Image (cartoon, rainbow, N blue to C red):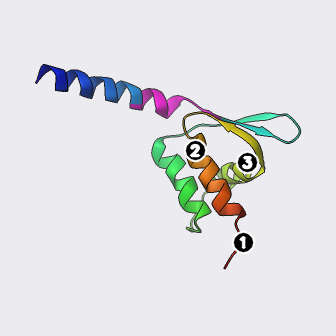
Amino acid sequence: MYKRRTLEKRLRALESQHRFEPDIITLTDGSQRKIFGSSDYRLSLLSAALGAGGLTPAQVADLDLIRRAVTIRGPSEGLFELARAIADSPDE
């Protein structure tokens, strides 16, 4: 039981750290932008790339940054690479 509580405590600490660590987007001109947000917000960007409607202006701007990125570094880089690939794929 003690080990389980310790593990749960560590997982909560990692989740809270992940939530506040930004993803760093590097653009073609070498400038960098940061995307902050909870994991739910970051997942909403993937949903937006899949065509979900009802985007906020902040989501539209962040999705545009992801589309224009040369590199993405941070806790959600894999998720954002997937969103970029989906957003750049041709419509069928």
Q: Are marks 2 and 3 in contact (CB under 8 Å)?
A: no
Instruction: Identify residue for label 2.
Output: 78
Q: Residue at x 46, y 48 (%)?
A: 40
SS of the residue under disc 2: helix
Q: Residue at x 56, y 48 (%)?
A: 79
Give the Cα distance between marks 3 and 1: 19 Å
Rendered position, 61 above or below 90: above
Q: Are marks 3 and 1 in contact (CB under 8 Å)?
A: no
Q: Quadrant of the C terminus?
A: bottom right
Question: Residue 44 in the image: x percent, y percent?
Answer: 52, 55
Q: Residue at x 53, y 60 (%)?
A: 47
Assess disc 3: are there few (<14), some (14-19) or many (≥20) residues with their C-alpha within 10 Å of its C-alpha. Answer: many
Left or right placement of residue 7 versus residue 45 in this view = left
Look at the magenta stretch and give its main secondary structure.
Answer: helix
Assess disc 2: are there few (<14), some (14-19) or many (≥20) residues with their C-alpha within 10 Å of its C-alpha. Answer: few
Q: Which mark is residue 72?
A: none
Question: Residue 58 in the image: x percent, y percent?
Answer: 64, 50
Residue type highlighted by circle 3: Leu
Residue type highlighted by circle 2: Gly
Q: Which mark is residue 90?
A: 1
Q: Quadrant of the N terminus?
A: top left
Give the Cα distance between marks 2 and 1: 20 Å
The quadrant in which residue 12 appears is top left
Q: Foreground residue, 82 or 34? A: 82
Q: Foreground residue, 88 or 55? A: 88
The quadrant in which residue 13 appears is top left
Which of discs 3 and 1 lies nearer the camera? The answer is: 1
| Magenta residue span | 15-23
Disc on the earlier residue, 2 or 1: 2
